[in-house]
Amino acid sequence: MTADETVPGAQRFVPTDATGLADLRTAAGLCRGCELHADADQVVFGRGDAAARIVMVGEQPGDVEDRQGLPFVGPAGRLLRRAVDDAAIPVDQIYLTNAVKHFRFQQRGGRRIHQTPDQVHIVACRPWLLAEFAVLRPAVVVVLGATAGRALLGQAFRVTRSRGVPMPWPASAPRPDDFPADPVQLVATIHPSAVLRADDRDGAYRSLVADLGVASRLLGVRPQRGDVPAGLA
């Protein structure tokens, strides 16, 4: 661990006797593992069924998510839902979460401007992500963007090198102690917010859907909408 990763971290706040996601969600509300809790409105834990076969991991909550207390309910979340539909992934098979559970931002007047979490925040919050995985035990993990990739695959991860290709869970990647190594597949892609920022939004959206289609096929889902995604409205 490097100097910039040294932080008290969330581990001491993760209950050792948790029986499910509800216990973890309650405990996460009391987390003081890094300084981000001080300015955020609330912790934003994951949502979805504990039996979901696919976990999608994003960066951190945004302004809308922080206010509502739910992940992926802002503009990027709405775009992701459209992409999930175009990739023919059943919504009831998805659990949504973030690598960092508190919103990091800079206040500018009346606006809260998103700031990318530092490695210290990723490391501090990783115990919550591992605790979620220990309960969920998914078949497929979709890595949405660079921050999620660094949280799971290390600082050398690059979305542009790895996106859209099924990968086994690396032996060097963090995992719960009893997490199965062989069945879990990872698929990396861009974060949906990157589509919203792209100059060619329709092209970026189609690429996102194509990457999610890889995850859909790993689940054994047959496409229902043809080979070409609908694209952005």
Image (spheres, grey):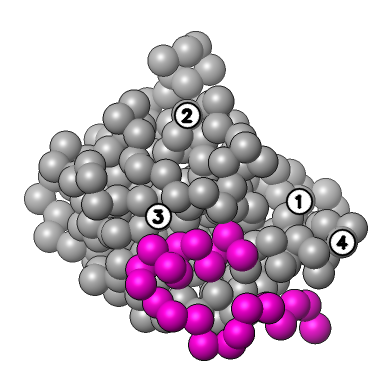
Residue 101, placed above or below residue 154: below
Return the residue nearer the eye: 120 or 197: 197
- Magenta span has 144? no
The percent coordinates of residue 205 (x first, y second) are 72, 67
Q: Element under label 2? A: loop
Residue occupying image coordinates x 45% and y 50%: 166
- Provide the residue designation for mark 1: 113
Marks 4 and 1 sit apart, C-alpha to C-alpha, by 23 Å
Residue at the bottom extreme?
224
Between residues 132 and 187, which one lies in front from this camera angle? Answer: 187
Residue projecting furthest to the front: 227
Q: Secondary structure at mark 3?
A: strand
Please name the residue that numbered disc 3 is placed on.
Answer: 141
Q: Which residues are magenta?
A: 210-233
Q: Residue at x 45, y 34 (%)?
A: 153
Of the numbered discs 4 and 3, the one sitting upstream in the chain is 3
- Earlier in the chain: of badge 3 and badge 1, it is 1
Give the distance between the C-alpha atoms of the residues marked 3 and 1, in whole angstroms. 28 Å
Amino acid type, residue under disc 1 in the picture: Ile
Give the spatial CA distance, label 2 vs label 3. 15 Å
The vertical placement of 79 against 107, above or below, is: below
Q: Can residue 16 be seen from the camera position used here? A: yes
Query: Residue 210: image x %, image y %?
Result: 61, 65
